Structures are given as C-alpha cells and as structure tokens.
Image (tube, rainbow, N blue to C red):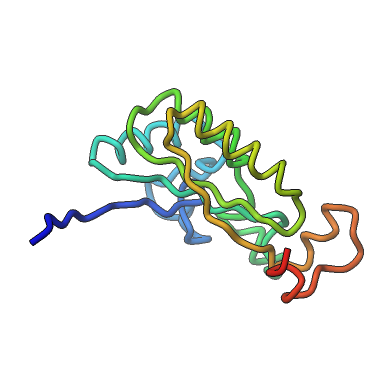
C-alpha cells in the first residue's frame, strides 16, 4: 500500500475570512495591512508543518451593503504578489498560493506574475485560478459592463 500523507493548507485573506474577526478579544484589527503580524502568522504555520498559505483575493471591494463593509475585517488587504514575494524571504518551505483572475488580465501578465513569485520563492508558488464574478470589478478596469459568465470561462 502506498504511503499516505495529509497536506495542510491555510486559507486566509491574508489573516481571516470571517468579516468580524477583528472584533474578537486579542485580535489585531489592522492585521490585513500589518506585515509584521502576517509574517508572525506564516512563520507559525511553517513551524506547524503547514504545506501552503493561500491568500484569497478580489478585484473589487466585496459586494456587501456599505454598513456591513464598515464593520468588516475582509474589505481589502495587500496585493497578493507583493505580499507573497515578501513572505517568501522570511520562510523556507511553505507554499505560497495566490488567487489570480483570468477575466481582466492577459495571459502574459498572469504568467509573468506567477513565474516571478515562483522564482523568488524557490519554486513555492501556486495558483488559485478564478474568473471574476463581482460585476463591480469591471469598473476598476475602465469597463462599463462585466463580462458574461460564458465569455469569462471561454477566456
């Protein structure tokens, strides 16, 4: 029988997915924009033998009511390739996975970013391939209308 091994990955954005996490006693309200906090956490993950750190990302502010966004921990965070490249310098083994949308970028740009992260990190880059579903993202790219579902997946 083949040897089986459990793989562990931390799914974060970059600190927490829960929008109210900053309200928890002892939490870091500024954690998504505090490199020292993120560096501390990824080093703990690596020491705990996690295989990967996955940073979810969005190309627009989350599609939530404004009053909910005002109380949210996950409104925005560092740009993933900048953050993961910096984290690669303070870690040795943990995989560094970023969300990369194919909706608004040309293939060359996506490939270049991931190739750069992969070289900087010594082969530890991973890609969470997505199409962008938030219609507000189109506005960030100078477009009035969001690409239709079938067209996004064709692209």
Name the image quarter holding the N terminus.
Answer: bottom left
Residue at point 21% right, 55% down?
6
Which residue is farthest top? Answer: 89
How far across and down, in percent of the image, does residue 105 sit? Answer: 75, 50
Residue at point 51% right, 28% down?
119
Q: Is residue 143 above or below residue 14?
A: below
Given residues 99 and 11, the one toward you in this image is: 99
Residue at point 45% right, 49% down?
54
How far across and down, in percent of the image, does residue 20 sit? Answer: 50, 60
Q: Is residue 143 above or below residue 106?
A: below
Given residues 21 and 84, the one toward you in this image is: 84
Q: In this view, does 134 lie above or below 129?
A: below
How far across and down, in percent of the image, does residue 129 sit? Answer: 57, 57
How far across and down, in percent of the image, does residue 5 sit? Answer: 18, 54
Q: Which picture quadrant has residue 41? A: top left
Residue at point 46% right, 56% down?
21
In this figure, what is the number of numbered marks? 0
Given residues 29 and 51, the one toward you in this image is: 51
Image check: 86 left or right of 7? right
């Amino acid at each position: 029988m083949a040897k089986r091994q459990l793989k562990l990955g931390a799914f974060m954005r970059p600190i927490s997915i829960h929008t109210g996490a900053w309200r928890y006693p002892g939490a870091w309200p500024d954690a998504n924009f505090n490199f020292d906090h993120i560096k501390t956490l990824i080093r703990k993950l690596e020491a705990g033998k996690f295989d990967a750190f996955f940073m979810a990302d969005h190309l627009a502010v989350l599609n939530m009511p404004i009053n909910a966004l005002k109380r949210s921990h996950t409104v925005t965070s560092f740009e993933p390739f900048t953050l993961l490249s910096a984290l690669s310098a303070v870690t040795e083994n943990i995989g560094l996975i970023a969300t990369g949308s194919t909706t608004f970028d040309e293939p060359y740009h996506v490939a270049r970013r991931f190739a750069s992260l992969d070289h900087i990190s010594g082969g530890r880059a991973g890609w969470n391939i997505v199409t962008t579903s938030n219609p507000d993202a189109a506005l960030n790219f100078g477009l009035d209308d969001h690409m239709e579902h079938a067209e996004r997946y064709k692209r």
